[in-house]
């Protein structure tokens, strides 16, 4: 689907190499590491949704998750593929849109989303919620790490700084909220310091 959302991402990745993007990390997100350590994320078929350059994806695979990376853009997937090869791992990568996930109904145990959902404009968020709900098993988990509203919103739109109500609006009918937390990075630019950490369970 070549809509504005897709075009914006494809354009974004033409601006600089994937590992120069502001979200690229060499280390997995602490919140993900912590959730894995505490046994909060079921091991099984796992999708890193909007996997970018694959840092969290590689971490999940190393931790024994049966991981698959999905991203709408080709460039970060090329980059992730090289890292996976270098690590001697086999991790499938699929170029696909979160709104139209190419998985069977109820086939996924865990979806991790770090910074993908917060790029969705309000009118297309319900499509994302329906798509992830469709592919998750009943009881499956959606683990999200998304920008918090308590910081400046760039004037040009996304990525959106989200209120909790904006998650509830789209997820409540299909998911239970298991936990809601946040992380704060004092050394990041003022508009990227605070993130929601939300764990949802498919009803
Ligand atoms: C902010 S980046 C985060 C990348 C990675 N998760 C990380 O934490 O480094 C968001 C990623 O989501 C991808 N993305 C955006 N919209 C998407 C969609 N509709 N379907 C799949 N991936 C999408 C982008 O291409 C981008 O790689």
Image: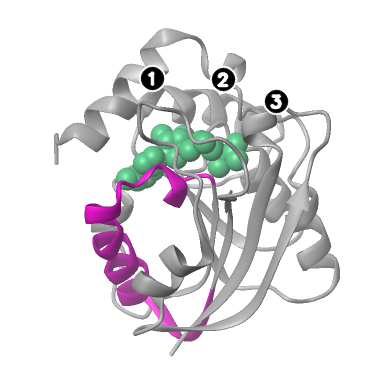
Give residue 129's position: percent from left, percent from top. Answer: 34, 67
Give the quarter of the figure containing the N terminus: top left
Q: Quadrant of residue 2?
A: top left
Q: Residues within 10 Å of mark 3 (few under 14, many from 20)?
A: few
Give the distance between the C-alpha atoms of the residues marked 3 and 2, in whole angstroms: 14 Å
Seen in the picture, residue 49 relative to 40 is either above or below; the reply is: above
Q: Residues within 10 Å of mark 1 (few under 14, many from 20)?
A: some
Would you say the beta carbon of the disc 1 residue lies within 8 angstroms of ligand 1?
Answer: yes
Q: Main secondary structure of the magenta part?
A: helix
Query: What residue do we see at 36% from left, 34% from top?
Result: 157
Q: What kind of element bears circle 3?
A: loop
Looking at the image, tell me whether mark 1 or mark 3 is earlier in sequence order: 1
Depth check, front residue: 36 or 156: 156
Residue 98: numbered disc: none
Q: Are marks 2 and 1 in contact (CB under 8 Å)?
A: yes
Quarter of the render that holds ligand 1: top left
Residue 84 is one of the magenta-drawn residues: no
Would you say the beta carbon of the disc 2 residue lies within 8 angstroms of ligand 1?
Answer: yes
Query: What residue do we see at 36% from left, 27% from top?
Result: 74
Tag 2 residue: 21
Give the distance between the C-alpha atoms of the residues marked 1 and 3, in whole angstroms: 19 Å
Residue 12: numbered disc: 1
> Bounds of the magenta span?
115-141
Query: What residue do we see at 25% from left, 34% from top?
Result: 6
Q: What kind of element bears circle 2?
A: loop
Depth check, front residue: 34 or 163: 163
Tag 3 residue: 189
């Amino acid at each position: 689907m070549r809509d504005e959302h897709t075009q914006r991402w494809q354009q974004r990745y033409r601006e600089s190499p994937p590992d120069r993007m502001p979200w690229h990390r060499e280390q997995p997100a602490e919140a993900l590491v912590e959730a894995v350590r505490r046994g909060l994320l079921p091991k099984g078929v796992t999708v890193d949704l909007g996997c970018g350059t694959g840092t969290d994806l590689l971490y999940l695979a190393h931790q024994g998750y049966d991981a698959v990376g999905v991203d709408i853009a080709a460039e970060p997937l090329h980059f992730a593929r090289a890292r996976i090869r270098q690590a001697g791992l086999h991790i499938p990568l699929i170029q696909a849109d979160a709104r139209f996930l190419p998985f069977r109904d109820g086939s996924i145990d865990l979806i991790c989303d770090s910074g993908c959902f917060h790029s969705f404009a309000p009118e297309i968020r319900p499509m994302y919620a329906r798509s992830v709900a469709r592919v998750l098993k009943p009881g499956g988990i959606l683990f999200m790490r998304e920008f918090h509203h308590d910081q400046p919103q760039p004037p040009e739109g996304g990525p959106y700084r989200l209120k909790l109500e904006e998650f509830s609006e789209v997820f409540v009918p299909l998911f239970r909220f298991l936990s809601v937390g946040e992380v704060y990075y004092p050394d990041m630019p003022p508009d990227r310091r605070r993130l929601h950490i939300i764990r949802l369970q498919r009803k």
